[in-house]
Image (spheres, grey):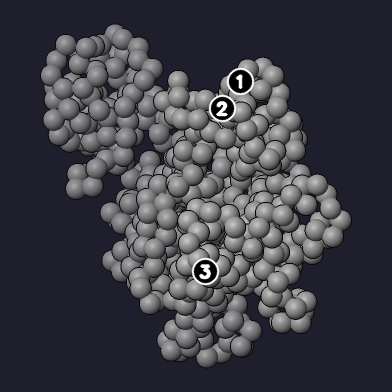
């Protein structure tokens, strides 16, 4: 039974009968907390039909629904808001429909396609805390759209060329003495990152020496020997010089092997990888075509620019004077290539931090000026940065929190707390390790996803892993508690056929609240997709878990003597566990059966 659709139909019938008018659009919304009811009809727009005050209009519609609909048992009016109380028998029927639908919350394939880009790292350093929020957001948005029946293509662009990787290469040539991941025992991404840091140290030292010799700061930055080495490597790479390209392939290979380990632990995946080294040439080609069309212009030094001042932006360089490309160049090429590779996609979602908002405004505008209609289908999923309380976690070089370190410490803390609670004495070490992985990473993912993506956030590791409060472990523990109840129900041979559930005529307030919350699951999925916000799903899962705990504490399940009510409560517990599991999986979080 689709309660929302049925209720809309009954309200439309009431308006037709009362005012001899047909109306398509109704403002029907969830009732605000603190007021009795589950659905609220906003009656202000209906006064044009009723020729009465909002309050009188609401009362007349409420009276009609109570008398004729069979759905509404009573109502209350607050100004022009009609709060409707749905009959318990209707809620029981709604629940019976949900219980019978084993694919509840998962839509059949719609034939619609979407592309979601996330991660998109540089190949000069390991992934960090910001990448964790990025990956978890992008992965979750993709999973939410998949639940809504979309075919979703998960992709990333790997920034594998440019001055950043040349800096690591130059430092490795100068200081590396042939080091490899195998010889050092370091993950490949961390080894390359080590030399990126070495480059920066040497670069700063050389600038300081040059300035002390009387060279201006600007000239010192250009004259730095190690910077000149990096720039020379970039030119050689773009000229396809054999030794340079081989070193580039080797060091990038180290990084990719390291990334794969990190992605595997994160629990994220990709359908297709794009590489800047393969897309920047298409971008350069498009830029040169744009010059011919008069969309872009060349300056005297040979650099190519786009003038967006007429659009309220500024001028943007697309090719440097030496002919080398910039990030914007490869992004133009990548966007075009993706729509060629996947011509059916309705949109392309870029999961990138909010410091790049201007970049994407410019990118989408350039694509539009080049004549690509798909520019209107591009969306920047902009998210805020993540801060940490000082001194809570280890960080590399005192500035960047390493993703591997953070995940490992979360899992270690989860294992420590799990052992201290002493509820897993009969578990093997491998089972405890698996459980700790689920709890530690679940805590991390939930905390990073429960905040609206647009907001900057503070990640508090100690708070995130608590079993009480707005946390992932709280939801995981609730799921494990329900699973224990269901195991007991099986041992007592308590189960429902499903068809008898709608025969329950009276519900307790907490039962009614749970059915309402479960029934709202699909609406929350649609809202999360529309807003590109996994936070909607995260907070839904939390509210559902919290609601269940209130139910569990206020009502006896196995102490109930009415067999019909007992079966209903067990079935209700089963569905809550199922919806919690589905919700958390959309966030990339596993929920254990025992905890």
Measured as percent of width and height from the top left, residue 406 is found at: 51, 72
Between marks 2 and 3 in the image, the one whose residue lies nearer the viewer: 3
Q: Secondary structure at mark 1?
A: loop
Residue 354 in picture, x, y percent from top left:
45, 46
Identify the residue shown where x is 79% and y is 63%.
Answer: 247
The residue at 80%/58% (across/down) is: 244
* Residue that appears at 25% across and 28% down: 42
- Work out whether residue 139 can be spotted: no
Q: Which is more foreground, mark 3 or mark 1? A: 3
Task: Kindly check if marks 1 and 2 are in contact, taking CB atoms under 8 A apart as contact.
Answer: yes
Real-space Cα separation, disc 1 to disc 2, in angstroms: 7 Å
Q: Position of residue 195 (x, y in %)?
A: 64, 70
Q: Which of the pair 206/243 is nearer the observer? A: 206
Mark 2 or mark 3, earlier in chain: 3
**Residue pointed to by mark 1:** 295
Q: Which residue is mark 2?
A: 306
Percent coordinates x, y for residue 184 in the rendering: 71, 82
Lower sequence index among marks 3 and 1: 3
């Amino acid at each position: 039974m689709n309660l929302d659709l049925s209720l809309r139909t009954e309200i439309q019938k009431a308006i037709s009968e009362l005012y001899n008018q047909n109306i398509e659009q109704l403002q029907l919304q969830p009732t605000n907390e603190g007021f009795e009811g589950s659905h609220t009809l906003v009656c202000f727009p209906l006064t044009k039909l009723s020729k009465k005050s909002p309050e009188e209009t609401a009362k007349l519609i409420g009276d009609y629904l109570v008398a004729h609909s069979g759905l509404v048992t009573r109502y209350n009016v607050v100004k022009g808001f009609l709060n409707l109380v749905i009959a318990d028998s209707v809620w029981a029927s709604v629940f019976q429909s949900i219980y019978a639908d084993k694919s509840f919350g998962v839509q059949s394939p719609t034939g619609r396609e979407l592309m979601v880009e996330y991660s998109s790292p540089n190949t000069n350093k390991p992934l960090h805390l910001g990448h964790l929020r990025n990956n978890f957001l992008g992965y979750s948005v993709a999973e939410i759209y998949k639940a809504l029946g979309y075919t979703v293509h998960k992709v990333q662009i790997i920034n594998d060329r440019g001055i950043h990787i040349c800096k690591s290469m130059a430092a490795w040539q100068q200081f590396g003495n042939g080091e490899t991941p195998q010889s050092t025992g370091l993950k490949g991404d961390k080894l390359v990152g080590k030399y990126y840091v070495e480059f920066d140290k040497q670069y700063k030292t050389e600038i300081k020496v040059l300035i002390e010799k009387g060279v201006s700061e600007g000239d010192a930055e250009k004259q730095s020997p190690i910077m000149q080495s990096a720039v020379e490597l970039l030119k050689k790479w773009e000229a396809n010089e054999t030794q340079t390209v081989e070193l580039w392939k080797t060091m990038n290979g180290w990084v990719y092997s390291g990334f794969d380990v990190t992605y595997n632990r994160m629990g994220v995946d990709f359908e297709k990888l794009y590489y800047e080294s393969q897309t920047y040439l298409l971008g350069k080609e498009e830029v040169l075509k744009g010059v011919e069309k008069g969309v872009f212009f060349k300056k005297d030094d040979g650099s190519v620019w786009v003038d967006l001042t007429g659009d309220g932006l500024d001028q943007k360089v697309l090719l440097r004077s030496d002919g080398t490309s910039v990030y914007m160049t490869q992004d133009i090429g990548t966007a075009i290539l993706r729509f060629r590779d996947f011509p059916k996609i309705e949109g392309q979602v870029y999961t990138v931090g909010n410091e790049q908002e201007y970049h994407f405004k410019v990118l989408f505008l350039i694509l539009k000026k080049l004549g690509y209609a798909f520019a209107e289908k591009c969306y920047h999923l902009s998210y805020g940065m993540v801060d940490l309380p000082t001194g809570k976690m280890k960080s590399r070089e005192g500035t960047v929190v390493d993703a591997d370190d953070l995940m490992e410490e979360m899992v270690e803390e989860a294992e420590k707390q799990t052992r201290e609670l002493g509820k897993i004495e009969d578990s093997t070490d491998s089972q405890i390790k698996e459980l700790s992985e689920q709890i530690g990473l679940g805590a991390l993912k939930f905390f990073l996803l429960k905040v609206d993506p647009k907001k900057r956030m503070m990640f508090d590791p100690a708070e995130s892993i608590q079993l009480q409060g707005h946390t992932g472990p709280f939801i995981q523990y609730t799921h494990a508690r329900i699973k224990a109840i269901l195991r007991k129900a099986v041992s007592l041979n308590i189960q429902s056929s499903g068809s008898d559930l709608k025969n329950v005529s009276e519900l307790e307030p907490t039962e009614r609240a749970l059915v309402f919350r479960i029934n709202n699951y699909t609406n929350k999925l649609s809202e999360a997709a529309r807003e590109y916000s996994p936070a909607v799903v995260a907070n839904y899962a939390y509210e559902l878990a919290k609601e269940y705990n209130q139910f569990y504490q206020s009502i006896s399940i196995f102490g109930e003597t009415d067999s019909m009510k007992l079966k209903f409560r067990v079935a209700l517990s089963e569905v809550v566990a199922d919806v919690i599991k589905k919700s958390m999986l959309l966030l990339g979080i596993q929920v254990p059966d025992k905890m």
